[in-house]
Amino acid sequence: MKVAAYVSAVLLLAFADPAARAQQVIMFASNFYPVHSQLSIANGDGTGERPLLPLTGLDYSPSISPDGEWVIFTSERAGSADIYRVHLDGSGLERLTDDPAYDDQAVLSPDGKTLAFVSSRETGRTHIWLLDLASRRAHLLTPNSGSDFRPAWSPDGKWIAFSSDRDSKAGHAPGSWERLQSLSVYVIRPDGSDLRRVTRGRGVAGSPRWSPDGKRI
């Protein structure tokens, strides 16, 4: 069986207890062709690698909650691509979304109450949605005629950065039939206000991440 592994994220987990030192954990997905993908976890130095959950199908796009308690990930174990969470020791598996549309790229807010994720619900194009974990009600945050990807919460929870092709115009590369679509980074408030474009020019600006102090993306 051919196996290809890639590191999808390296995340620093800072626990609330000031006496506890920060722990660095590597999360990655291993692809077992043709139809399986398994999440694994390891220490920051690469030791202690272990599967997060048994191999059941397709698990991918992991992120870790700000409190270090949960791994949020996408799984197709029930047929459609939905969002799940599980503790870092593999216990407490819970399904967070249940929709026939494509749900992916989920991240929890700093207070752990709201899930930002990408979904193709309603329009068939990917946009940013927010899910209130208490009520399990989801609403569309970024309606537009383009597509949006990779939400990222600011450390204070007041902004969500994401990439989008909403203001781009597809064109052909010189001397090529290939059509190119550019992506830019935007920020928006969780209530849908103050949408701003923060990168300019052609090309691809994707997968934004905030600095720890929230002053840079």
Image: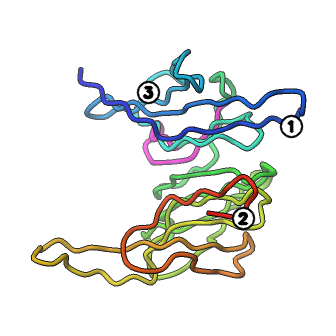
Which residue is labeled 3 in the image?
Answer: 56
Which residue is labeled 2 in the image?
Answer: 215
Q: Marks 1 and 2, how far apart in space? A: 21 Å
Q: Does 167 sit left or right of 211 as displayed?
A: left
Q: Identity of the amino acid at label 2?
A: Lys
What residue is drawn where x is 42% and y is 72%? 183
Q: Earlier in the sequence, mark 3 or mark 2?
A: 3
- Give the extent of the magenta segment: 74-86
Q: Indicate the quadrant containing the C terminus: top left, top right, bottom left or bottom right.
A: bottom right
Q: What x and y, as percent, mark residue 24? A: 65, 31
Which residue is labeled 1 in the image?
Answer: 16
Disc 3 secondary structure class: loop
Q: Identity of the amino acid at label 3?
A: Thr
Q: Does 133 sit left or right of 54 as displayed?
A: right
66 and 23: which one is in front? 23
Q: What x and y, as percent, mark residue 137? A: 71, 60
What residue is drawn where x is 49% and y is 21%? 54
Q: Identity of the amino acid at label 1?
A: Ala
Report if residue 78 lies within the magenta region.
yes
Q: Earlier in the sequence, mark 1 or mark 2?
A: 1
**In the image, residue 87 above or below residue 136:** above
Mark 2 crowdedness (10 Å alpha carbons): few <14, some 14-19, many ≥20:
few
Disc 2 secondary structure class: loop
What residue is drawn where x is 62% and y is 71%? 140
Front: mark 1 or 3:
1
